Image (cartoon, rainbow, N blue to C red):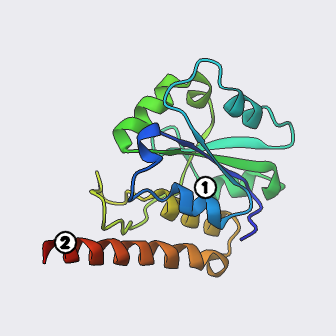
Amino acid sequence: MANRAPLYILQHPNEVAHPKGTAALLSASLTQCEVHVAEQCGQDTWLDSRLADPTRRCYLLWPDEQAIPLQQLQTAVADPASVAFMILDGTWRKAYRMLHSHPVLAQLPRVTLGPIKGSYAIRKAPFAGALSTLETGYYLLSQWEQDPVRYAPLLTLFKQLNTQWQDFAEGRRA
């Protein structure tokens, strides 16, 4: 699917080959989505080049008290195509460490999606509303571009992954 706002996914190395990971599915599903693997970076040229793009302002999707709601950002931005989003992919603990080991990430303006009921059944959710990377991409893009129907195949893909994994797990128990 062609998406207007690029997604940049900074992925923890432990997630690369994780069978329940969804970043690769999201990246393969979108025209403007890049995954970069790095836990800690001193000089990270990939990250620096994405953030130095003068045609786009990058926002970190991170739910904390500094984050502004995505809807508020929509009203403040004249051209939605001038925005890119950074997503951290890893367990919440690893993502938090990644955030604090990349000083440039910690300085990015933060946005949050607001309350959403996640459905990541195949991994333990650390809190209500925690989302997989694939779900995050769906909710972020469907809200940002105000077109949930267009991005509905991402949720279908996610549901299929959950079903396949649960069927596999049940088969192993039998």
**Numbered circle sitting on residue 70:** 1
Which quadrant, please, contains the C terminus?
bottom left
Q: Is residue 34 above or below residue 12?
A: below
Image coords of residue 56 (percent x, y): 80, 43
Classify residue 123 by image quadrant. Answer: bottom left
> Residue shown at 65%/25% (left/top)?
44
Q: Is residue 140 visible?
A: no
Q: Toward the viewer: 10 or 145?
A: 10
Q: Which amino acid type is shown beneath numbered disc 2?
A: Arg
Q: Is residue 117 above or below residue 15?
A: below
> Residue shown at 73%/57% (left/top)?
32
Image coords of residue 42 (percent x, y): 59, 18
How crowded pointer 1 is (Cα within 10 Å; few <14, some 14-19, many 20+) is rated as some
How crowded pointer 2 is (Cα within 10 Å; few <14, some 14-19, many 20+) is rated as few
Q: Which amino acid type is shown beneath numbered disc 1?
A: Leu
The residue beneath circle 2 is 172
